[in-house]
Image (tube, helix red, strand yellow):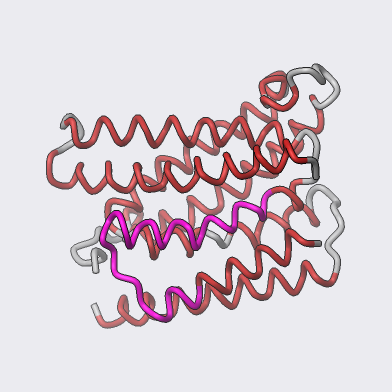
Amino acid sequence: MATKNKPTGFGNPWLQLAISVACVTIYELLLKRGAAETAHLSPRWSWTGLPGLASIYVWVAIVFVILSLITWLYVLRYIPLSVAFPISQAVHVLVPLGSWLVLGENIVTLRWVGIALVSLGLALVAKPVAQLEERL
Amino acid sequence: MTRISLVIVLIALAGEVGGQLFLKRAMGASNAGGFRSRQFVLPICAGILLMTMKFFLNLGLLQHYDLSFIYPFQGLSVIMVILSAAFTLREKLTFQLVTGSLLISAGVVLISLT
């Protein structure tokens, strides 16, 4: 597996993966706030997303998405895409939780079940990787 | 959800999958040939272009739907990405990886249905 000879400390690709996930979560929450703020500006062009650029939240979101892209590219140098990508899907747990906590959106029971399933899948994908890391 | 918004969601999905494959190919090439080689520059540009397209399509969708409703549709990309990585990048898939990814996708679809 391509996790051999990986840097340690801040350069650890697994730490960078966690930072990338955190950046994507913050980016999505800011993007939603910015999109909501600018939804009324230009209904004709709203599907392109361009009117969203009038919001400061969207620009801060862009900073976070660039940070997440940089950390993600770093991750891809050391971890196979088929391992890193499923683990990065932790955002599907964190974004709905963030939408609930920060944006006040509602989460119904079925959505909680979905969040639990995603968490279970993440554990299943991450377990062999964690065992491999322990052996190295 | 209207037909046009469904088409936009699908185009954004394809952009995500294609973008990730190009980015991985670029970073793989950077290990061998550095950051100035043609094998790095072309796929990184293609990957960033596709991810940018996905970004603006998502922004447009978010102006019409809740974040917690739109975002999980991208979860379908998990299975698409790992299968594409196996076929195009020759990455090894394990039973546990596929099962975990299927669970993630199922969970994401369940979230989307609500």
Residue A107 falls in image quadrant: bottom right
Pinpoint residue B79: horizontal percent, then vertical percent. Answer: 49, 63
Q: Is residue A105 above or below residue B7?
A: below
x, y percentage for residue A76? 33, 52
- The relative height of residue A109 versus residue B51 in the rendered view (above or below) is below
Q: Which residues are magenta?
A: B71-100
Seen from the viewer's position, the closer of residues A26 and A120 is A120
Judge by depth and name the residue closer to the eye, A84 or A136.
Answer: A84
Quadrant occupied by the C terminus of chain A? bottom left
State the residue lying farthest toward the front: B3
Q: Residue at x 25, y 58 (%)?
A: A7
> Which residue is rendered at x = 58% and y = 58% of the image?
B76
Q: Tell me which residue sits at (42%, 33%) in the image.
A: B48
Name which quarter of the figure residue A120 lies in. Answer: bottom right
B40 part of magenta stretch: no
Quarter assignment of residue B75: bottom right
- Is residue B91 covered in magenta? yes
Q: Position of residue A48 (x, y in %)?
A: 67, 25
Q: Chief secondary structure of the magenta span?
A: helix
- How many marks on residues? 0
Q: Is residue B33 above or below residue B71?
A: above
**Is residue A104 found left or right of A30 in the rendered image?**
right
A73 or B104, nearer to the observer: B104
Q: Residue at x 16, y 32 (%)?
A: B37
A50 on left or right of B50: right
Q: Quadrant of the N terminus of chain A?
A: bottom left
Q: Farthest residue toward the left? A: B33
Where residue B112 appears, as percent x and y from the top left, is 73, 59
